[in-house]
Amino acid sequence: MEFAKPPLEFAHQVQKLRERGLIVACPDKASFYLSQINYYRFGTYCWTFFSDYNTHKFLPDTTFEQVLDLYIFDRELRLLVLDAIERVEISVRTQWAYHLSHFAGPHAHLDKQNFNLKGFAHQDFIDQLQLELRRTTEPNILRQLQKYDEPAPAIWICCEVLSFGWLSKAVSGLARRRLKQDIADNFGLNEVVLTSLLHHLVTVRNICAHHSRLWNRDFTITTKLPNNGDQNTISSINLAKPRELYNTLVLIGHVMNKIAPDNQWRHRLVDLLHRYPATDTSAMGFPADWRKRAIWQF
């Protein structure tokens, strides 16, 4: 089938939304927002307000502001989640470099024997590491590269240029389970749960970093859930909704409590949900009694 839809001017995009039943009190304001957001992106937030998905007809009394509020909520949610993942990533870098270097020395990352070669492409890892080192403009790392004659700097330097994706692989690819558990202990998790969570958070981080829709996402790459350890965390998990965002938020909250005990991240999340009370939390996998669950008690 040949695509035959013509591009529409912003005012005509607003008119099309109105023809489908969306209440637009101020067309000029709506047109301005669409000139900044993109009609197609805005449309992905309209779906939850449709009464008919084939004709894209809106539910009665749906307003432009309701859709816009959902868009703004999702943007703020992404920024909040991305803030936490940044801190998790930096902490994991630190733990990985610390434990591996104390086990096998400053250049342990260069020795393929320290990794499970059945599940970890060590040469690809080294190639990517060398590429990132060539790309870096970080003055301290550049001075290190000039000062020493070595295949790559010490692991506590190299970890700073690793992408989150390769860091996740480098943790799960460690040959010694004891090392993985030493890292996981810092986060109060079993090493199997931690490696699964990191793999999942790489996906979540990419969604956030590329400004994609997060709030009602069904994840294909999910995370294993803990069944022992911190009971506040375990009792707060929603086993009935394993593919939605809620359990991710629970585990992020758990990890944040371990790496930054005085953090306000959970408070900020609850405040965000309170500021947008019309947001359908069940679409994110929140149980009806989520606010009464232990991890959200503060």
Image (cartoon, rainbow, N blue to C red):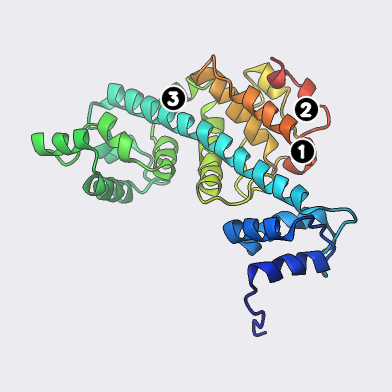
Residue assigned mark 2:
290
Q: How many marks?
A: 3
Instruction: Please tell me whether mark 2 sits on a helix, a strand or a loop.
Output: helix
Residue 1 in the image, given as x and y percentages of width and height: 67, 84
For the residues carrying marks 3 and 2, which lies nearer the camera in this image? 2
Q: Quarter of the image holding residue 273?
A: top right
> Does residue 153 appear in this view?
no
Q: Which mark is residue 183?
A: 3
Q: Earlier in the sequence, mark 3 or mark 2?
A: 3
118 or 3: nearer the eye? 3
Residue 2 screen position, x and y as percent: 65, 85
Checking the image for residue 296, the label placed there is: none
Residue at the image point whose x is 26% and y is 50% from the top: 131
Task: Kindly identify the amino acid type of the residue bearing the numbered disc 3.
Answer: Ile
Q: Would residue 72 appear left or right of 125 to someone viewing this image?
A: right
Q: Is residue 295 above or below residue 280?
A: above
Q: Mark 1 touching mark 2, by CB under 8 A? A: yes
Of residues 42 and 123, which is closer to you in this image?
42
